[in-house]
Amino acid sequence: MSTPLRVIDVSGTPKEMGLAYGEQAADLIRANVDAYLRRFPFERAEVVRRGGLFQETTRQHFPRLAVMLEALGQASGVQPELIYAINARSELIYGHPQDGECTSMGLLQEHTILAQNWDWHPDQRPYTLLLVTRDERGHEVAALTEAGMLAKAGLNNAGLGVCVNLLGSDRDGRPGGVPYHVILRSVLEADSMTWATRHVMRAPRSASINLLIGQPGELLDLELAPGEAGWLHPQDGILVHANHFESNIPVYDTIKDWGGSSLFRSARARRLLLEKNDLMAVLTDHFSAPLAICRHLDERDLPSDRSETIWTVVMDLNLRSIRLIPGPPCGGEPGLEFSLR
């Protein structure tokens, strides 16, 4: 059995929520920062410098989220530049797309469903948590995330949900972007799909990211690169994405330099969903194992590049519910279920 997922449930203004988050998860936040300082390809001083640049852009474009991030850093005893650095961890380790091999799925049925396998280095699993925020405006969010970050996959009480996939392009690494995980959180700060798209497409970016967004009755996929964007719509009530560009936006997709399972995962998941109409059967699919939709460790990878499904997320946007299954979902663990009511 895996260690139970910690739930951090906070309320109030952005500062009050940040302080409470930092106090409740201080041990995990400090440990997560230390883990990424070992993984980043820079010395600490350079990480701090780069974190400061992300701090400036976040304050400019998402001031409420900046207040929350800086308050959680204060309460956990971590300097703010390092908090921004881990929220920009994808930018700071860009160039290694084999680290992330997520598969996201959306279904338009009687209820609108979002799901994904989150594939990441297994050493990061102990630093994950479910963050629940209830702000002074009545806006509520529940998101799986890493300690010290504001969101990964999640949903809000407007029924808006998001899943995420790492992408790679020749534009990655440009300075001046809003951190990857702040962009993710900005989706969940919106009360409609329209405002979610405005948040993410207006924000400057220094890394490529794919967002599968849903709200009851509709799905939209946004492929975002620095200075460029593309979008995809559901076909036959299904929208699926992996780790390569599918909308033909004018960027060089760096998966061409790496290859990998993304080249078949999204197409296979789409076909299996049409054939079987069984979401868990697709999330546990092992074709081309161990690097499958249900991903397991491959001992041929370098230790620093190893990845497996560390969490599976299934969200019913009509019910405002999220189910989190630890480890590869084939393990059969029931996981944690949480609803915004």
Image (cartoon, rainbow, N blue to C red):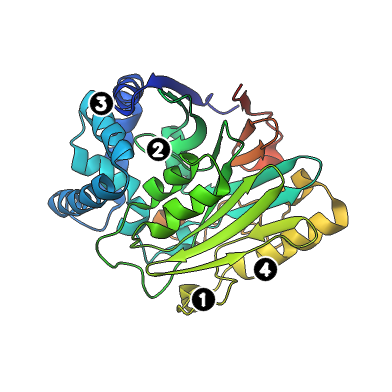
Disc 4 to disc 1, C-alpha distance:
19 Å
Which quadrant of the rendered structure holds the N terminus? top right
**SS class, disc 1:** loop
- Badges 2 and 4: C-beta atoms under 8 Å apart? no
Q: Which mark is residue 264?
A: 4
Identity of the amino acid at label 1? Ile
Identity of the amino acid at label 2? Leu
- Mark 2 vs mark 4, foreground winner is 2
Label whose residue precedes the other's in the sequence (3 or 2): 3
- Mark 4 vs mark 1, foreground winner is 1
Label whose residue precedes the other's in the sequence (4 or 3): 3
Q: Position of residue 133 (x, y in %)?
A: 45, 26
Q: Which mark is residue 76?
A: 3
The residue wearing badge 2 is 150
Front residue of 285 and 72: 72
| Left or right: 306, with 57 as reference point | right
Label whose residue precedes the other's in the sequence (2 or 4): 2
Residue 84 shows up from this direction: yes
- Mark 3 vs mark 1, foreground winner is 1
Disc 3 to disc 1, C-alpha distance:
41 Å
